[in-house]
Image (tube, rainbow, N blue to C red):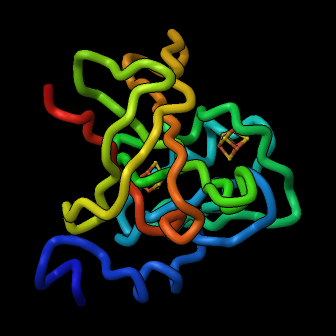
């Protein structure tokens, strides 16, 4: 309902989707909420972590029994930019969030900036810990940020500190 009224999914609503899990270690979080005919995320995953099945309008589900290797192909394959890779325990204090990033200039590893939530609200400081640009990603870059643990399910965009 929040998506219809305000244009983004509320934090408590996101947990109901079959693509949203809290698996240990790095795992995909698929915030795909509408029954559209679409399945490149399923085809992109070499480990078959993502299941849509024969009904192409079904929501993608994450198979918690299959280990994600963090290749990022699902993130880059989703034209809706609805897939993130999350590690809720990146280190003692931090989570990591990998997100699709299609802005220039690209941030560099070590850059500091801010993380924004689904509503576009700035929620915390963020540090760039990886940026990946591969031909297989078809011009979508994968940006990984480090944020405080409690922001693992909130931080969904990165903006550099203005200079
Ligand atoms: S990152 Fe790679 S292994 Fe993990 S779910 Fe996405 S496509 Fe599959
Ligand atoms: S590719 Fe993206 S929009 Fe399409 S089904 Fe997968 S998560 Fe949803």
Location of residue 62 (image quadrant): bottom right
Q: Residue at x 79, y 39 (%)?
A: 69
Residue 149, given in percent of the width and then of the height, sits at 59, 64
Placement of 108 over or under 41, stated as above or below: above
Q: Residue at x 63, y 67 (%)?
A: 61
Residue 99, given in percent of the width and then of the height, sits at 45, 42
Residue 41, given in percent of the width and then of the height, sits at 55, 45
Looking at the image, residue 37 sits to the left or right of residue 2; the answer is right
Placement of 118 over or under 87, stated as above or below: below
Figure quadrant of the N terminus: bottom left
Looking at the image, residue 162 sits to the left or right of residue 63; the answer is left
Looking at the image, residue 141 sits to the left or right of residue 119; the answer is right
Of residues 36 and 49, which is closer to you in this image?
49
Looking at the image, residue 136 sits to the left or right of residue 122; the answer is right
Placement of 91 over or under 162, stated as above or below: below
Residue 126, given in percent of the width and then of the height, sits at 42, 46
Total numbered circles: 0
Q: Residue at x 35, y 70 (%)?
A: 34
Figure quadrant of the C terminus: top left
Q: Residue at x 49, y 15 (%)?
A: 133
């Amino acid at each position: 309902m929040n998506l219809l009224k305000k244009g983004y999914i509320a934090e408590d609503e996101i947990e109901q989707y079959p693509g949203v899990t809290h698996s240990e270690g790095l795992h995909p979080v698929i915030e795909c909420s509408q029954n559209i005919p679409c399945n490149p995320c399923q085809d992109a995953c070499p480990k078959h972590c993502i299941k849509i099945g024969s009904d192409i309008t079904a929501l993608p589900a994450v198979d918690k029994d299959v280990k994600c290797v963090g290749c990022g192909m699902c993130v880059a394959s989703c034209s809706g930019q609805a897939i993130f890779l999350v590690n809720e325990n990146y280190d003692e204090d931090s989570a990591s969030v990998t997100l699709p990033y299609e802005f220039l200039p690209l941030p560099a590893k070590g850059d500091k900036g801010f993380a924004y939530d689904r509503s576009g609200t700035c929620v915390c400081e963020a540090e760039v810990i990886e940026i990946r640009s591969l031909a297989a990603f078809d011009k979508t870059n994968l940006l990984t940020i480090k944020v405080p643990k409690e922001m693992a399910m909130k931080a969904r965009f990165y903006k550099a500190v203005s200079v």
